[in-house]
Amino acid sequence: MAQDGLKIRLPHSLRTLLVILGGVIGRNYRHGERNLVAVSVCGAFGMPLYYFVWHNLFPQPYENLTLRLIGGAMCIPLTFKDHWPENMRRYAPVLWYLTVLYVLPFFFTYMTLRNDFAPIWLVSFVAALLLLVFLVDWLNLVVLSVFGMLLAWTVFNLGGGRVSDPNVYVELMPVVLFALVVGTVFSYRNETLKQERLDAMLMAGRNLSNELREPLLGIRTSTVSLKRYLPQLLETYEAAEKNGLAVREISPMHRRALTNSLERLQRETGHAGAIIEMLLRNTGGVPIDPTEFQMVSMAECVETALQRYPFASEAERKIVKVRLKSDFGFFGSDSGMVHVVLSLIKIALSSIAKHGRGDVLIELATSPGDCELRIRDSSAGPPAGRLVNLFDEFSVLESDSGTGPALAQAKKLVEAFAGAIAIRTERGQFTEYVITLPPMDASGAIV
């Protein structure tokens, strides 16, 4: 029996399977999240209501109030998902997935079988498949439809159900296949159009970043040369002025301004260069190459990011606190992780600047089961309804921070390092980004 405080260690293959399953469920949730509350309200009222329609107004051969109440009960919590406790919100995608599975493919297939393929239930069954097309992406459309129908057919047969004409299975198959194929094509096309829009946006960002980077490098090089030789020119000017040579007057204030302007120009070009590098990362301009992965210290990545981050002022630098005592290693890319930390720091500081309060805490934590990097800003958490979409390439939060699809790219990088990234938040209190990585030995093997 596991002791309190200890985490259950799952085999690596099982953890991989759970990650894949979580990805499928998360993909479904992100696709249908905008319609989730509206559909859940319809299901909560519609499931029990139609019992009286098909049982009293237009009696059908078979009705089951219990099955309908179960479906309605599954929909009710989802209608209030934005008001769930913080520690329960992570289960919303699983409940949504199970609810869609039960209410649409399973329920309507089972009721169609129990009503011996009555015309009204055949129409209802096709309508359920069409609704499923609009709620899920093409991959989950296939998974949910096939699994839901097979599950309903299994329950029907285990319950001793029989249809009057077994040939109806064969006759109905072309209709089901047509609905699935057309629905899959329709959904896949929507996904393709979205990806094309994203690719166009990222390509524009890459082109713009590359066009800006070259002249900035030229300015930085010229600034270094000016900073090296300008003091000598000013000293020569002062010597000539003291010796009474005919030179055009430059006031002492303007001479100090020349020296300070070089410092400012170098700082601003460094800031712009760091932003352009982040944009290139976020738009896929710097690909991930697993062949270059090696054991990397997380504390060193954080320290490098803090050294490279273009803080606007010393006051902004001071609001970032660090706790790096619990250092750990991971198998990946130091430049990739530095970029992730840079992006999260920028998002946190942008939120603080927007709300006019708060600070940033960066800390490392280790346990027997995993290792974590936590970056928390205490300004204000985003609305609960936006949490899932924050890792979408078109997230509104990311456009507010000016970093482009930063969280989407950060998620890809962390997952490439065999890790995961999550968000913990409390509205008006804080937002915390948690990067979880598996513990590794010196050879890079997961322990």
Image (cartoon, grey):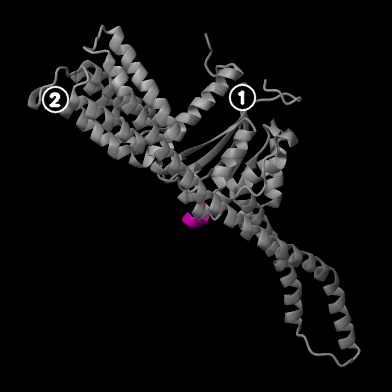
Asked whether residue 358 appears in the rendered view, the answer is no
Q: Quadrant of residue 63?
A: top left
The image's mark for residue 54 is 2
State which quadrant residue 330 falls in.
top right
Q: Measure how far apart labels 1 and 2 are at the Cα level.
A: 56 Å
Mark drawn on residue 367:
1
Question: Looking at the picture, how far across and down is residue 74, in whole percent?
Answer: 29, 26
* Residue found at x 31% / y 34%: 130
Residues rendered magenta in the picture: 351-355
For marks 1 and 2 on the same chain, the one whose residue lies earlier in the sequence:
2
Q: Residue at x 57, y 52 (%)?
A: 202
* Residue 136 relative to residue 166: left or right: right
Q: Position of residue 292 (x, y in %)?
A: 75, 36
Residue sitting at x 76%, y 82%: 252
Does the magenta portion include 352? Answer: yes
Q: Amino acid at mark 1?
A: Ser
Q: Is residue 383 left or right of residue 220?
A: left
User: What kind of secondary structure does the magenta stretch mostly adopt?
Assistant: helix
Residue 284, numbered label = none
Name the outermost residue toward the right.
243
Q: For this rendering, which residue is in front, 246 or 37?
A: 37
Q: Residue at x 59, y 42 (%)?
A: 410
| Residue 398 vertical placement versus 61 (above, below) | below
Q: Is residue 435 above or below residue 444?
A: below
- Inspect the magenta stretch and tell me whether residue 305 lies in it: no
